[in-house]
Image (tube, rainbow, N blue to C red):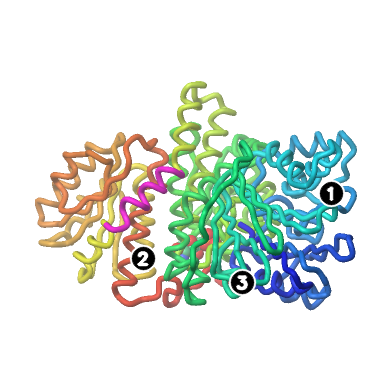
Amino acid sequence: MCGIVGCILAEKSASKKAFESLLRLKYRGYDSAGMAGIEDGKLVVKKDAGKLEEINQRINFLEITSNIVIGHTRWATHGAPTRENAHPHIDCNGEVAVVHNGVIENFQELKDELIESGHKFRSRTDTEVVPHLVEEGFKKGYDLFNSVLYAVKRIKGSYALAIISTREPDKIICVCNESPLIIGIGVDGMYCASDIPAILPYTNKIISLKNGEIAVLRHDSYIIRRILDGSPVTRSPQIIDWSPDVAMKQGYPHFMLKEIHEQPQSLRNGLRLQEKYLDLISLFMDRGKKIFIVAAGTSYHAGVAASYMFSKLAKVHVHPVVASEFIENYGDAIDIDTVVLAVSQSGETYDTLKAVDYARMRAATVIGITNTLGSTLTRVSRAYILQQAGPEIGVAATKTFTSQLIVLAQIALRLSKMRGKLSQDEIDEFKSKLHEIPDIVDEVIKSSESRVKEIVNKYRDENLFIFIGRGISTATALEGRLKLLEISYIPSIAYPAGESKHGPIAIIEEGVPVIVIAPNDSTRKDIIGNIMEMKARGARIISICEAGDREIAELSDDIIEIPRGVHELLTPIPYVIPLQLFAYYMAVEKGFNPDEPRNLAKSVTVP
Ligand code: M6R
């Protein structure tokens, strides 16, 4: 996730406004930043790696004296956070500047083709293909609008783009596809940005662009068209009346809730991984004789779920280990035949990095999954994959958990393919189930939120919750428990349901709430047995189950339904959503700030 902004005014004060907008977009990315304007018919580009304010002290963005400026604050996904990879990116002739938020999936083939036809690339980003494609449009004799159309018809993926050119310095072209982009209609000019807060001090008249739309902004007018057929779009602006604090959270009261709602998008981004990195990671895993997933907290729970994926899809034993126990438990067994897959949202967790260092010293192969390009984990891993979830501000991990799962599922599938463990039909079936997940999550958020609030209201005075699941749902139960515990401070336990009779059932008495993760998978019959044994002892059952599962509904006091047909190895993704919402609304109900739970930090970088 990155932040983009554009500003076209009657006066030459666009750089100041664009800079202030970028400051308000910092939460979307903060490893590098840049701006471009047009001065006396020439493109002026200023950009660098680092934090926005520090960069500004070094290169002073406000020196750009222009009425037209585009800007970018970056959260690196393709190419490290360096000056060269910072946006804006330009074409060979210095006529076109582009800022981009999203992922261009087919950039490598486009880049190869453009290099072949003589284009010079300066960065390792996916974005840089765009200015070069616009340049190609110019070569074909098109104007700026049609050159941009030519470019966007060739790219695949997600993009919010703002583009300027010295050839037509009176306009910004904005394009939107699966990455957010809004237009602001001001009295002094027109604006575009990744989100509303960025430009709210200048105007509260906002139009949200929809997928497949392209807009042309002049300082005193705007038009919107559909990319597909060029037909005009008429949409009235909304008048936004948010307070500054609410604006930062895009209308949500907390970052955690905003990030829960971002999951359909972060999951879509998580499906746009580069094939070559999936291949490389799978190749390393295939060579390992002992394979561990090493992680902490929520990332460990993703690792637990992944161990089922690897075993069932690729027929490989992958052992998930809590990072802080790795050396003590398995240290002596680590050698050159070991592969350690470290999973860490931040890429900076002390326990995970310590385990990784130890493994490297013993000649093991370390590979990583992280949300943070440039983090220590990316530097010490032989290969890594980025989750593409964008920055997560809430201390409780939500969208980064589900994006870890979708990345891990794709690695497991790739490994399975490499090892010849699934038929072509099975591979195709799993792939299509993977691609259904973002829409299913969207539906779950929409359908379950008010139901979750009712359940929170009913159980608000409970002082113990038990979470159970079987098979891969054990991971979902563990994660649901952690969410509730860490932000609402209610003591909770979670365990694989089969363990009940080996001890935990002793604490069940009249009225104890038990949250059961009960998808329609191979464990369903057994979990029904567990529900019955809990009920017989007076427990109140809250089930997360498949829509229309009458048997589970009849045994439960409350249910939350998840759409039918989710692949059993993907159930943790939609099934954890109501649990995230449950924890969130419980914390709010109790008057706690879910974004800043006591005693916890977003990234635990100390022993
Ligand atoms: O950055 P990491 O994924 O390595 O962080 C690991 C844990 O510290 C983290 O998941 C923590 O458990 C969160 N508070 C969970 O919400």
Closer to the eye: label 1 or 2: 1
Q: Which mark is residue 584?
A: 2
Closer to the eye: label 2 or 3: 3
Secondary element at image label 2: helix
Tell me where residue 567 sits by quadrant: top left
Badge 2, how many Cα within 10 Å: few under 14, some, many 20+?
A: many
Q: CA distance from mark 1 to mark 3?
A: 28 Å
Secondary element at image label 3: helix
Residue 258 seen anywhere in this rendered image of the structure? yes
Q: CA distance from mark 1 to mark 2?
A: 46 Å
Which numbered disc, 1 or 2, marks the residue that appears first in the sequence?
Answer: 1
Q: Position of residue 104 (x, y in %)?
A: 67, 44
Determine if the magenta segment contains residue 440: yes
Q: CA distance from mark 2 to mark 3?
A: 25 Å
Which numbered disc, 2 or 3, marks the residue that appears first in the sequence?
Answer: 3
Badge 2 amino acid: Tyr
| Residue at the disc numbered 1 | 91
| Residue at the disc numbered 3 | 24
Q: Position of residue 103 (x, y in %)?
A: 64, 47
Instruction: Out of 247 and 593, give the one closest to the viewer.
Output: 247
Magenta-tinted stretch: 438-450
